[in-house]
Image (tube, rainbow, N blue to C red):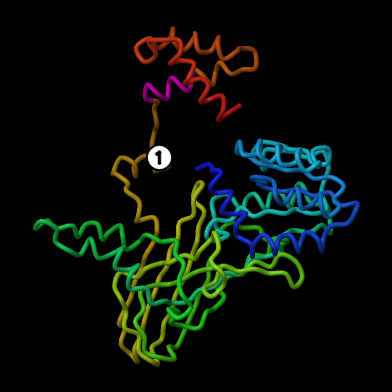
Amino acid sequence: MAYTITSYARMIADKDRLQAYASALKNSITPNSVVLDLGCGQGIFAMLACKYGARRVYALEVENSIELARKIARVNGFESRIQFIQGLSTEVTLPDRVDIIVSDIRGVLPLYRQHLPAIIDARKRHLLPGGRLIPQRDVLWATAIEATELHTRLIAPWKTSLWELDLSPGMDFARHQWLKVNVDPKDVVLEPQCWATLDYLALETTDVSGELEWTASESRLAHGLLLWFEAVLAKDITYSNSPGHPESISGQVLLPWPDPLHIEKGDLIRVQLRAQLVGREYVWCWETQVSRGKTLIADYNQSSFFSQFLSPSAFQKRNAKFVPSLKPQGEVDSLILRHMDGTQSLDEISRALAEAFPGLFPSFQKALERVRELAERYT
């Protein structure tokens, strides 16, 4: 989903995040620096790089928001020093390698869509030996939290009878759904622990896992796990979306348990966390065991995969042995893409489409709309 002007306004309003990035850029840039702003959005980091003396900046963005970045560069007098490039970073080759790559293409956590593949690719293809990455690394943290209201909002509707209807099948999905939240530090139940560190100068894999173990120091009610990150942008320059820090655009991630747990002092809590990139999205798995002496009082195995509504036919289509054939809409797209050979205009392709599928496109204008859609996506 593309960011809106409101989304970018919220990013600009996140002062702690922007101040940390500004400080890291100021401390890293020299008059000879060439900088890549990876996923530049509205272009703030590219502008700051120019302001702090970068000789050249490449601002790379796949979305049309790059037009806003161009306008901001123009009114600030940086247009001649910034080369804007629209496209996927993994498909772009820069004119030369850069001294610094700056990026912030995380979601609630750094494990977000194509963030890690983009960083790994950019480091290998675009960064000079000895060059710098901002951020240098992200440290991932976890704890258990008390979140009665949030848990009730997520789970309770499927445990109640509404007009004498049994809605309990919804629990099969709700118990595997993670939530973006902002929690109060007083709701933290266990001492936070680091479960993974993403060192971007050395990172090679997009999948991350970690194991955690706590012995409860007090008796508390708990409803799930809370995850966040601490970003190390440069030496001594960090920022975090942890509970207790000023509320950020990121928030934190709540991985709920199916039921509230009354944890008693001395209970042993073991957790295994896994995040695996499947296609363009991460699948989260969290396995929790709580032991009281020799008694296992909770044993949960949860995965965001099971929060998805997938029919048997959808599962079948994911099977490696499935033999696909195009539906009529697929045949339409196939014809359009075959005609996009670099020799035909949208007008010519649309007329060929309307002629081939008169039942689907009764007018030239309808055909043109479909061709434009694919042209924006693939050309």
User: Looking at numbered disc 1 in the image, what kind of residue is underneath it?
Assistant: Lys
In the picture as drawn, the residue positioned furthest to the front comes out as: 75
Examine the rendered structure and indicate whether residue 220 appears above or below residue 44.
below
Residue 279 image point, x, y percent: 50, 46
* Residue 102 magenta: no
Residue 370 image point, x, y percent: 47, 21
| Residue found at x 56% / y 24% | 375
Check disc 1 and report the residue beneath it.
321
| Residue found at x 74% / y 60% | 22
| Residue found at x 32% / y 63% | 175
On the rendered structure, is 349 left or right of 40? left
Residue 258 image point, x, y percent: 30, 69
Total labels drawn: 1
In the picture as drawn, the residue positioned furthest to the left comes out as: 164
Please report the bounds of the magenta region as a residue range: 327-335
Residue 269 image point, x, y percent: 41, 82
Examine the rendered structure and indicate whether residue 322 appears above or below residue 328.
below
SS at circle 1? loop
